[in-house]
Amino acid sequence: MTAVTDQDHTEQAGDAGPENAEGTVEEPVEGDADMGGKDGHTRVESASGGPARAEAGQGRKREDSGPGRTREDAAHARGEAVETPDGPVDADSAGGWDDGLIARRVTAETEQAAAVEVRGTNAPPAAPLAYDAPLRSRLDALRELVGLSRARLDSRTLAEAGQVLDEAAARRRLSGQHTVVAIAGATGSGKSQLFNTLAGVAISETGVRRPTTAAPIACSWSDGSASLIERLGIPPRLRRRPLQSAESEAQLRGLVLIDLPDHDSAAVQHREHVDRILALVDAVIWVVDPEKYADAMLHERYLRPMAGHAEVMFVVLNQVDRLPGEAAEQVLDDLRRLLDEDGIALGEYGEPGATVLALSALTGDGIGELREALGQFVAERGAPARRIAADVDAAAWRLRPVYATGRRTGLSEEARDDFAARLADAVGATAAGEAAERAWLRNANRACGTPWLRLWRWYQDRREPATGRLPLRAHPDEEATARQRVEQAVRTLADRASAGLPAPWAQAVREAAVRGSQGLPEALDELTARAGLPPGRPPRPGWWPAAVLAQASMTLLQIAGGLWLVGQIVGVMAPNLGVPVLLMVAGIIGGPLVEWSCRMAARGPARRYGVEAERRLREAASGCGRARVLDPVAAELLRYREVREQYGRVVGVG
């Protein structure tokens, strides 16, 4: 049997030979460098190759007789119980094997004994864990997702995803040839007894005292697992090796078994040990008993939240020897029902899921089946990657409310056009276009009107400012109304852009819109002044000179006819009323006719001039709103689309 110790092993200066009086050889049982030294564990092998026991805490075999022999040693030799400060200890537990805990006593006197040889095994470091391409892609997407979301989501929301990434990176650097499996259970479920049964030797203390297991204990079936155990925070003095047998080593090679404290322990530190290590191991064996298999704490605190980890989970119904007849099958069926209600997939009919077994660690019934299932599970070397994948699934599911949405999101063209129209209305683009049209018509009338009408209009212009040259916002009330319209336009756009988005991203969109709206009314005023009506008179079409010449001709006809009549009246010219009257009538009728014709011809150019003025103002307002509000909002929506795509990669969609 392999001796399990947790004390320092030293050699005395007088030891000269590799073998002691009984022909035993001591060597470290853990292949890692830190296990073969000061805190290492040793085993004693007989000269014939069979294992022998070594006394715990001494690291060497004592003689049954000798001048320095103690009373306890004599009792060991006779097979009697030994009185210790902790109570009587029988010969088996107090002799070569300690029962897996720290040695209860250390002999003060050192006896002259045969020399032993401490041999360290320089085992090569185990190959690191390798993830497959899909898992690597999901981890990369999760890392990108967290990076893109840090400025939009609080650290608590991203804490679990960040922890999954850290643990995945840490586990990847460690051995891929070992599988760390924790045995967890409630008080009295028999998990420590199952731990000892699988190891083939009493490593973890068992008894009626509760809680019995106070700290996690590790048992490794092969070398190279020290870094994995160190990651769990288990000190060297609590690391063990199982009973050395070829069958056990071949079946469970690569297994690192962890015995946890009770998850329902009254000691807070014990529960903290359980929660901490359960987050780091590759798989877990849940041990339940016929009395507590339906315990609400177990199902609500552990099994239900870990439903996604079913593929790396064993659920063992222990102590079936206490159930009479078919009661074991009934309890096992009820346990399967509860697991199904918890959402845990059961690995039945070849489907992936949790393995559910019934056994008795006390009688050994069902242990072979568990050992076989555990050996196959470890031999596949896929538990670490499946555990990380399940952690990614769990983190993605908890992040779903902040990334996933059931409706289409974004800014439609209709929403953009409506925002631009609201800003144009706020700056008075329509009114400005109408004013420009009226100004063009007024100039046309001035250029092509009769002199008498132009004189009258000149008189009117002297009394009031020219139409079309008034400021667009001349009163405080109008300015306040325009500001309210701008704010309303921004709110409407923000509501439309954030509709359907998860709360954090909707808030980010609204904040971007609000930031952009600051100073927007003033910017619109400045742009309106620059993009409004050009200074001076509106441009004139090419036919205006001809119309002006025609109107001047009509005026000249009127003047010539009038002068002719005056000359006839005063006797300067020969009497002839027909010609001067005809000239005057032609001028009087032709002048208004030319003016009316010019007004009709000016409607088209005036309308185009007004539309152009309105377009320039609308474009200026739209450009200002786009630069200050639309672009920041669109950037937030683009960021959300990016994280949504990354989230789809994390969950394995798209």
Image (cartoon, rainbow, N blue to C red):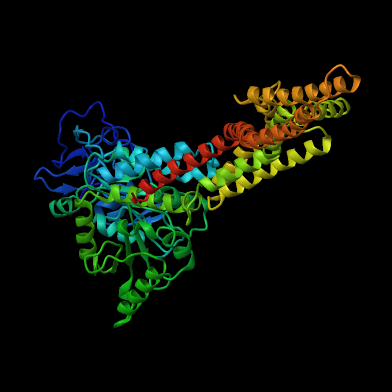
Residue 256 percent location from the top left of the image: 28, 48
Left or right placement of residue 245 versus residue 497 in this view: left
Left or right placement of residue 268 versus residue 167 in this view: right
Q: Residue furthest right?
A: 570
Tell me how many marks there are. 0
Q: Nearer the viewer, residue 361 or 154?
A: 154
Note whether residue 233 is visible: no
Note whether residue 193 is visible: yes
Vertical placement of 13 versus 190: above or below?
above
Name the residue located 55 percent from the left edge and 39 percent from the top edge: 633
Name the residue located 30 percent from the left edge and 36 percent from the top edge: 173
Q: Nearer the viewer, residue 522 or 339?
A: 522
Name the residue located 68 percent from the left edge and 28 percent from the top edge: 532
Q: Residue furthest bottom?
A: 325
Q: Nearer the viewer, residue 84 or 215?
A: 215
Q: Quarter-wise, where is residue 422 in the image?
A: top right
Residue 212 percent location from the top left of the image: 43, 57
Q: Residue furthest left?
A: 48
Vertical placement of 150 versus 409: above or below?
above
Residue 554 percent location from the top left of the image: 73, 26
Left or right placement of residue 16 versus residue 184 in this view: left
